[in-house]
Image: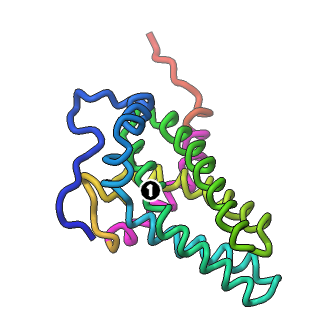
Amino acid sequence: MPSTPISPVFSSARVDRSVGAVFLRLLRDPFSVLVKRWNWKSALLSSVFRAAIFFFANLSAGLPAALAAMQTELLFRAVSSGFYGALTEAFREAEPPWAATLAVAILLPLANHSLEFLVHWMRGTRKLLPSIISSVCFTLVSTLFNSYAMRRGALVVGEGRSSLAHDLRCMPRLLLDFVLAIPRRIRTAAAPSVCPKD
């Protein structure tokens, strides 16, 4: 776990925080954005959850097939998810938030599952289609949640980071807020506007 500070993607209030600006930084200096800020928290948590998904998706093909798929996913995610976490973190301060979330929700599955499919296809994972479908569904939900959590300071390894233990203690509240975010927006949007009296 790094103890030295990691420079933020946005180093000052004057820096352009648009989604386009983040894309430009990714193109100009991918090493700083993705490698120096490799997100070990994402790598650890994603490896565990996704290995379980592949294990249970392949269990009907037998225990050896399930263990092989789990091992493949565990090793693949231990490396790749740190980069995907860094990508999500790069967009956490981008504005507007909906565009940043949309960008990450499109970029991650494209990059993520193309490579994942290739790795498992080469490895000979037995139940490849159900495994990938389950993984894609998990990615969509987890990407939205990770973006939500990172905007609130959790699961980050850059500026404003906390310990993993602290982040995990915050998870129940963050999960509840995340689940209730859409109903709250709908309720707010549907609330009648009050017209001030003359």
Tell me the kind of residue under disc 1. Answer: Phe
Residue 49 is at least partly visible in this image: yes
Taking the view exactly as shown, the residue that stands out farthest to the top is 198
**Image position, residue 52 (x, y; %):** 62, 77
Which range is magenta? 166-187
Residue located 67% across and 82% down the image: 68
Name the residue carrying label 1: 83
Of 92 and 66, the residue lying toward us: 66
Which quarter shows the N terminus? bottom left
**In the shown orientation, is residue 53 left or right of residue 108?**
right
Q: Residue at the spot x=63%, y=79% of the render? A: 70
Say which quarter of the image contains residue 18.
top left
Q: Residue 190, relative to residue 32: is it above or below?
A: above
Report the predominant secondary structure element of the magenta stretch: helix
Does any portion of residue 172 appear in the rendered image? Answer: no
Total labels drawn:
1
Is residue 123 found inside the magenta-colored segment of the image? no
Quadrant into which the C terminus falls? top left
Q: Position of residue 42 (x, y in %)?
A: 44, 64
Residue 44: x percent and y percent?
44, 72
Tell me the element at label 1: helix
